[in-house]
Amino acid sequence: MKYGVNEKGYYGDFGGAYIPEMLYPNVEELRQQYVNIINDEGFKAEFDDLLKNYVGRPSPLYHAKRYSEKYGANIFFKREDLNHTGSHKINNAIGQILLAKRLGKKRIIAETGAGQHGVATATVCALMGIECVVYMGEIDMARQAPNVSRMKMLGATVRPASSGSKTLKDATNEALRDWIGNPVDTHYIIGSVVGPYPYPDMVARFQSVISEETKKQLLEQTGNELPQYVLACVGGGSNAMGMFYHFLDDEDVKLVAVEAAGKGVNSGESAATTFLGQEGVLHGSRTILMQTPDGQVVEPYSISAGLDYPGIGPQHAHLFKVNRAQYTSITDDEALQAGLLCSQMEGIIPAIETAHALAQLEKMTFKPEDNVVICISGRGDKDLDTYIKYFNF
Ligand SMILES: *Cc1c(COP(=O)(O)O)cnc(C)c1O
């Protein structure tokens, strides 16, 4: 694949594994085994079976009629919101738990910010009867109390990270410390296309089912497996990578990645990484991130917890740099309005993350015959409080 990872773990200038020496054995074990395990027929059969009968795949490709009229093109929604647990995150969690089992691991750790990835991880650990420890910043635990309860209900242990800013970064440090201390029996499930190689490639492969299905569904519904445009929101970039994956080499398909501008790209409260960031190292890979001139990571901001991340995965950094995909950003206000519009025009309440991708439609012009696919990465139930406060329902 032209835009895929090379044998050294890089996408152009980005990627690699920038990790402390003590983590090397863990990451090296994964690197040596992941491709063989994922390509094994037995693995594929179990993965496909769970995606079908547990997650509920294939997720529908829905031709949104009223949106199509409004925007003057054929607009299709790829419905990841209908998955078990309400977003695309479960695809990756299922893939990694099956991989962990085949590596002989008896224990799973994860870190979570908003709690969504923690819930997906706790879910698959319950499914497999494997011990699960989720690290979460103390402040995030207070902000996202319902997700903490969900994880506990699912049988996971939630450990507070109480150092530093008590948020995602500190939870990540705690999880890494745990992994260094438990290299033999523990697998670390990362929730997006970020982290040291091989994680970005591994997660992209698990999420690529999104575009694999979309191609078939488009062929069935339109007679052509290739659309003119594909849109997705980007936090770390896993739903977007899954949505882009099987279209990457079809250069006529325009890929649009939508980041969170927060209160505006120049407001100082933003998560628009490609606009504000520079090249550097974040969470174990060389990528683009928001940082100060002396290399301190800048605290990102977005109203949507899932997009509130100071970087993007290394493959996205590459697609941005070589111009294969267009990177844009949408403000909190624009996203919330788009979430309301989608609710009232299509009867689908989207996650606020997803609403960023939907808002991008307002900024584009189409030809009537264009086919446009948007990844509906998740449902908005988790965001009702935010919508209610904003619109005063
Ligand atoms: C976590 C999340 C995202 C952002 O994560 P990516 O890795 O960029 O996909 C987007 N949408 C929803 C619904 C999420 O839960």
Image (cartoon, rainbow, N blue to C red):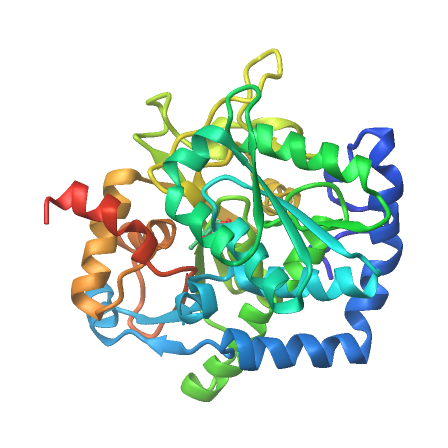
Measuring from the top left, give residue 323's x and y in whole percent. Answer: 57, 46
Q: Quadrant of residue 196?
A: top right
Towards the viewer: 240 or 191? 191
Left or right: where does residue 201 sit relative to residue 334?
right
Residue under the image location 64 percent in, 52 percent down: 132
Q: Residue at x 81, y 36 (%)?
A: 181
Any part of residue 262 in sight: yes
Question: Considering the image in quadrants, where does the N terminus appear?
Answer: bottom right
Q: Is residue 183 above or below residue 338?
A: above
Q: Residue at x 82, y 51 (%)?
A: 185
Please state which of residues 367 and 238 is positioned toward the viewer in this rendering.
238
Q: Measuring 50% from the left and 36% from the top, which residue is drawn there? A: 309
The residue lying toward the viewer, choosing from 211 and 105, is 105
Residue at the limit of the structure toward the top, as seen here: 294
Point out the residue furthest to the left here.
Answer: 393
Q: Position of residue 188 (x, y in %)?
A: 71, 47
Write down the quadrant of residue 340 in the picture. Answer: bottom left
